[in-house]
Amino acid sequence: MSAIRPADAAARRRTFAIISHPDAGKTTLTEKLLLLGGAIHLAGEVKAKGERRRARSDWMKIEQERGISVTTSVMTFERDGMTYNLLDTPGHEDFSEDTYRTLTAVDSAVMVVDAARGIEAQTLKLFEVCRLRDIPITTFVNKMDRESRDPFEIMDEVAETLALDVTPLSWPIGMGRNFLGCYDLVNDRLILMKPDGGGELIDVTGLDDPVLADHIPEDRLETLREEAALAREACPPFDEEAYRAGHLTPVFFGSALRNFGVAELLSGIGKNAPAPRAQESDKRDIEPGEEKVTGFVFKVQANMDPKHRDRIAFMRICSGRFSRGMKLNHIRTGKQMAVHNPILFFAETRELADEAWPGDIIGVPNHGTLRVGDTLSETELLRFVGIPNFAPEILRRVRLDDPMKSKHLGRALVSLAEEGVTQVFKRMLGGDWIVGVVGQLQLDVLVTRVEQEYGVKIGLEPAPFETARWVYSSNKADLDKLIGSNNSAMAEDGDGEPVFLARNAWELNYQTEQNPSVQFSATKERA
């Protein structure tokens, strides 16, 4: 039995996500963080060739073809006595629902901002999700080695757009081709960018230290002294309590591509970001230091290894010491399940997890037993809350090229729906399949994966419906009446729950008025 207590193990863990607008450099930053932690040994974008020219978190074929992240990846690494669980979220806005679910499993986030573009639409959307969940955010202003906006302008935009106090912990020296590095405002250190990337640390006594003149041209040194002094005077000092409450964001400047500023960012996460926090359940808040194991599934991914047709549930450990082979209660089904082969994710590799602690993300291989939102508990019958489905914005009817493969199609669609790739509805009248997504790219991923992983060719055509609503009622007779009088517009989701498919907003409003005891819900919490 391990002598380590859950509370002590949790204190040495940082579980965080990286969020950004597409092309802000999120995947490159992820790669450099993995390099720092020793999880990979070659920078994919710099030295690798062919297939290896991809950051190790983008494993899906469509991601490699298009150079984007469309699914959440989990990577664990260690540095300076800390264990980091990094969740790289989809960069494309069409996969915002997957990102939302991922943010239920982290304790903090890094927001990557393009130094030339500032706050962009997707960044703002993801920040709002973080705000809803009180997730503290560290800001990394990336691409300082390219032409960029004035640092004060960027910080003002972050402060005004996100309504946050902003505290720079480093300050850039120049920009673009004149970018020399940063000044560490916390420790009074000069961090010079090396020609081949990375940073060289030079200790100084302060901004007035004459040693600075040996490394920085006179005109830029004068600018640094003026700007750094103004930043210290105009911005509030870093306050850990305000940061962890989500009211203040510390800011680092750097270049992920040149591996500059990344070490300082990771050090800041280790020092300032919260350890695993209490998680809300339907009975009480579960503290990480509790002895009994609890956890929840926030993602399911099939066929990460096509050779084995595997299916992995990503489970966040919330409390206790998890050990391989232990039996846990599967709350949704009321059954016990033994977890014999849990895995930890180290970038492109996996290892069997003999143990795991609060904050860790483990993969649980299963054959369709586990779904997004499921709770596993060692003893107490409780359910973690707050992992919803959202009403889709695009509905399409599935056209099957080979009618003999209808059963294969059903299995593929339900399986991908349980992963969160898409939502799937089977009409009660006629039995045809309707898929619902947030964005067009999800449809492309769906078609590609159904063919590549399940051997079924499909097409998608416009559905005669505009939106979907889950329907609930405490009065079964009223719910049956709605279903009976609208059978052509009724469907079941992947869990077999009734869904009303509305042709337009007017029809939805009409049915809502005609059925006052029935709730038409745009969200469904995963039970």
Image (cartoon, rainbow, N blue to C red):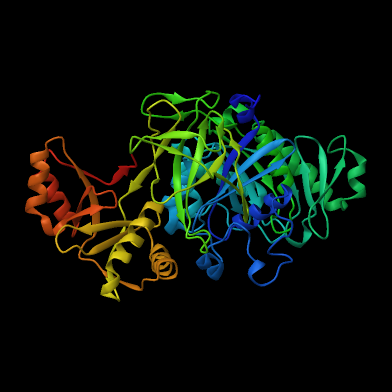
Count numbered badges in the picture. Answer: 0
Q: Can residue 169 be seen in this view?
A: no
Q: Is residue 213 visible?
A: yes
Where does residue 198 sit, x and y in percent of width and height? Answer: 79, 53
Q: Which of 439 and 290 is in front in this view?
A: 290
- In the picture, measured across the screen, residue 203 lies left or right of residue 480, that is right
Query: Residue at horizontal 51%, vertical 52%?
Result: 72
- In the picture, measured across the screen, residue 369 lies left or right of residue 265, that is left
Where does residue 445 sit, x and y in percent of width and height? Answer: 43, 65
Q: In which quarter of the image is residue 410?
A: bottom left
Q: In which quarter of the image is residue 267?
A: top right
Where does residue 144 sit, x and y in percent of width and height? Answer: 70, 55
Q: Nearer the viewer, residue 135 or 365?
A: 365
**Where 424 falls versus 377 (above or below)?**
below
Q: Which of 41 and 500 is in front in this view?
A: 41
User: Quadrant of the image for the C terminus?
Assistant: top left
Query: Residue at horizontal 71%, vertical 67%?
Result: 48
**Where 405 falls versus 385 (above or below)?**
below
